[in-house]
Every structure is written in C-alpha cells, then in structure tokens.
C-alpha cells in the first residue's frame, strides 16, 4: 500500500525527523529522493510569512499527491509545508518520494516542488526594513511548471 | 476571507458583509480598490472553500464564506 | 567556498549520518536535494558485489563532481558510493546537492546519479541461487545519460 | 588487473605477465577467450591507472599495471 504523508506545519520542523521515519517505512524501495527548501538567507529579509486558506490548501496538496501517484510509479510520498512566520534559514518545504526506480523518485519530487512553488494555495510575504512585501512566483517558476503540461 | 495582497487592499483579512450577495452586490460592498482588484482574472473566488469556475455567477447566502484569492506564491 | 565530499565506502553506511552534517555545513543554501539508492530487494538476490578500480573510480567521481559544479550553480555536493559486498536493502549510493535555487540542486543530483549509474568505474554482480551474474546498465540508464549530452 | 566479467574469463582478478608487452604480446599472453574479449571496442584498457585512447598503442614495461575494463554498471 502506498504511503502518503501530507502536512501543513505551523511550527519550525527538522527535516531529518520526518525523512528518517519515512525512509524506514519504505524499506525495500530502490531509492528515495528528497528536497528540503529553506527560507533563503538575505541580509535584508527579517522574516517571511506564509499564509494559506485552510479549505483549499491541504486538499490541494492531497490532489497534487494523487496526481504524482498517477504520473509516477511511487511507493511513498512525503509532502510537508510550513505555514506562518519563518526566519531566514528555517526549512519551509520538504518533499520526499520513494520508488523502485530513481527516475520516478527524482521526477516526482521535481513535479511536486514545481507545483508547490507556483500552483498551490500559499501566499508569501517578506518583512524588510521598510515593511512587508508580497512575493510572486519568478518567471523561472512558471517555466518549470509548464514542463509538466502534457 | 481576503488572502495575500488582497487583505492589504481590504484593510483586514476578513470582512463581514450583508447577505444575500451576488457578484454585483459583492463588488458594491467592497472598498473601491478591492472591488477593482477582484475583477482581475488572475484573482479567483471561492465560496465555502470551493473555487468558482465563473466568479460572476456568485450567489452567497447568510453564513456563507467568500474567499478572494490572489495569485499564489509557495515553497 | 563550495563544499565537496566524495567517498568510496567499503562498509555499510547510514545516509542520515552523512546528510545531516552536509546540510548543517551548507547553512543558508536555499535548498538541498538528496537521492539515496538502496540495493533493490529481490527475493532471488542473495547478495550484490560492487567492484571498482581504485586508480580510476575515485578520480572519476571527482571529475564528475567538477563537471556538476561547472554545469550547475552549487554550494555543496556530497557523493558517496558503496563498494564491496552488499545485501538487498542496504544503501549503495547517496548524492546530495545544496544550491540557492532548487532547479540546480535537483538537476545536479539527477546528473550525478545518471553518470554514476552508467558512466562511472563500477562493476556490479548479483548472487542468485545458481551463482553470480554480472549486471549491465539497462537501456533506460543509457537514455537517462544521453539527456545530458549537450 | 581484470575487472568485472573479464575477471571470469581470465579465471582470476589478476594475471602476472612477462614484460615488455605491446598489444600483440598482451593478446598472445592472455587465455584465448580473454584475448578475444579485449578486442571488443566496449572493453577499455588502462596502463598504470590511465585510460588508453588507443589500446593497440599499448607499451608496457616491467612493473607496469595493465587494467582490462569491461563496460561499467554502477549505483
């Protein structure tokens, strides 16, 4: 039975505490690919806030996981996203995919990250010396997402 | 519910409006800057947690939650 | 200064003990992508042996790391490969790349794995009930490698 | 040094041959099945840890290490 662990976390998390048990739970998997994103360090950024809309955000992540399972041959998928207030250097997202073949594991992580980045229900703003600024996806994020549209 | 930068335009993350509301009624009840912003096709509308395919077809009754959703930016 | 940790390990290793310190050493990195490959479980395989040729294998991995640093914008790269006798389920390879942008981190891991799989100096054989069998890269491995030839 | 499946053809992972050896001399000194296999262009040759671009140009002196390398299969 595929293992699927999808979470929104309002507090700081340590990726190792999620990835270790996930890997253990997917023994005999061939390979596991993991991406951990951190709030990018920027000397001008004091804090980052990620807001979400409960009725859409978590169901949207589950729907994304379902699409990843349809598209790739996976044994397990872990998808964890921070919400709330974060400091530079803190982990913001962790996606881990276990599969018999590395191509599926790597591509599933790539697919989920591209969609979390610019097609999931999150809104991000940064606090700088002059106040808060809303962040929009970069042009490159849209290009990354477009790779999967077939 | 006003999400992302639309909360700034609304001056608060939530507004309480008088039901029933259709699309014209919603626009009339919003602050002018926000009413203009919601016309932008990049801004989506959800009713009780379900996205509206056509926001102009909005029909909200007493107790319903309308969410105004600007373009996203995640992970 | 980019951090580059390349190793051949003759004994069983726990990927977490390598990835944790690697991630700590690359604080302020944006993102880190990691792939861990395990000896694929197969009820008919009793053991797997990976041989290498010292004068070529480790220098070849360093050259691969150099190419990854040339091709992608990386802050750090960890590339660890088992040699010797392994049992199904044991980790055989671990590649981890830290970068400011996720595209570089994910693609660098993908690039290194494709090359380790079919263009690095390793020879693999499996022990089954009827004896030892040499394993050659699958057709898919060659296709994966060809993606990088530009 | 015989690597991978070439070690099976040679019957051992190492063979000690008499120097000096050029390509014809090497082939003559190897067991027949192995001599035939090393002609396969997919099998490479290294001298003292350095790959030969043209294995037919092999010139090995006393104490040199010749490695016969079949196609690889890693990770």
Image (cartoon, coloured by chain):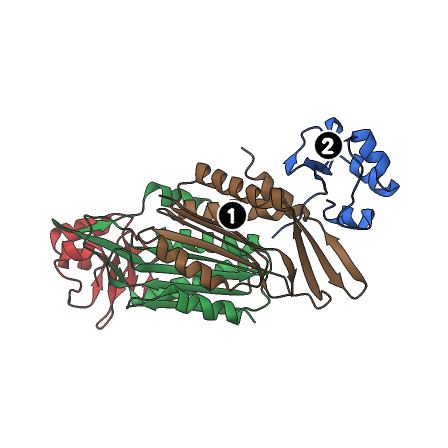
Chain colours: A green, B red, C brown, D blue
Residue C16, position as x, y percentages in the image: 46, 63
- In this view, which residue lies farthest toward the right? D32
Helix, strand, or loop for circle 1?
A: helix
Where does residue B2 sit, x and y in percent of width and height?
A: 21, 60
* Quadrant where the N terminus of chain A is found in the figure: bottom right
Q: Position of residue D38 (x, y in %)?
A: 79, 37
Query: Is there any visible trace of residue A148 in the rendered image?
Result: no
Looking at the picture, tell me which residue is in the foreground, C39 or A130: C39
Q: Is residue A97 left or right of residue C52?
A: left
Which residue ends up furthest to the top in the rendered image?
A: D57
Name the residue tied to disc 2: D61
Separation of marks 2 and 1 at Cα, in angstroms: 41 Å
The 10 Å Cα crowd at callout 2, few under 14, some 14 to 19, many 20 or more, is few
**What residue is shown at x 51% (from left), y 70% (from top)?**
A24
Tell me which chain the residue with mark 1 is part of.
C
Residue D27 image offset from top left, x and y in percent = 83, 35
Q: Name the residue tied to disc 1.
A: C110
Vertical position of residue A112 compared to residue B66: above or below = above
The residue shown at (29%, 55%) is A39
Pick the front one: A31 or B27: A31
Report which quarter residue C38 is drawn in. bottom right
**Most distant residue in the front direction:** D62
Q: Is residue C16 left or right of residue A29?
A: left
Q: Quadrant of residue B10?
A: bottom left
Q: Secondary structure at mark 2?
A: loop
Mark 1 burial class by Cα count in 10 Å: few <14, some 14-19, many 20+: many
Mark 2 vs mark 1: same chain? no
Q: Nearer the viewer, mark 2 or mark 1?
A: 2
Q: Chain of mark 2?
A: D
Is residue D13 visible in the rendered structure shown here? yes
Q: Is residue A13 left or right of residue D10?
A: left
């Amino acid at each position: 039975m595929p293992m699927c662990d999808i979470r929104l976390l309002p507090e700081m998390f340590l990726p190792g505490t999620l990835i270790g048990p996930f890997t253990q739970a997917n023994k005999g998997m061939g390979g596991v690919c993991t991406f951990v994103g951190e709030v990018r360090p920027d000397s001008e950024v004091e804090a980052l806030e990620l807001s979400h809309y409960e009725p859409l955000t978590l169901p949207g992540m589950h729907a994304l996981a379902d699409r990843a399972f349809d598209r790739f041959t996976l044994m397990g998928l872990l998808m964890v996203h921070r919400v709330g207030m974060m400091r530079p250097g803190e982990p913001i997202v962790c996606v881990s995919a276990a599969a018999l073949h590395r191509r599926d594991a790597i591509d599933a992580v790539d697919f989920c990250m591209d969609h979390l980045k610019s097609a999931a229900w999150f809104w991000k703003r940064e606090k700088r010396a002059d106040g808060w600024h809303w962040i929009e996806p970069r042009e490159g994020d849209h290009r990354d997402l477009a790779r999967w549209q077939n | 519910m006003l999400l992302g930068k639309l909360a700034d335009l609304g001056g608060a993350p939530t507004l309480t409006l008088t039901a029933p509301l259709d699309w014209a009624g919603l626009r009339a009840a919003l602050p002018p800057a926000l009413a203009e912003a919601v016309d932008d096709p990049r801004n989506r509308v959800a009713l009780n947690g379900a996205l509206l395919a056509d926001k102009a077809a909005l029909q909200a009754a007493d107790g319903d939650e309308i969410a105004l959703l600007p373009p996203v930016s995640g992970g």
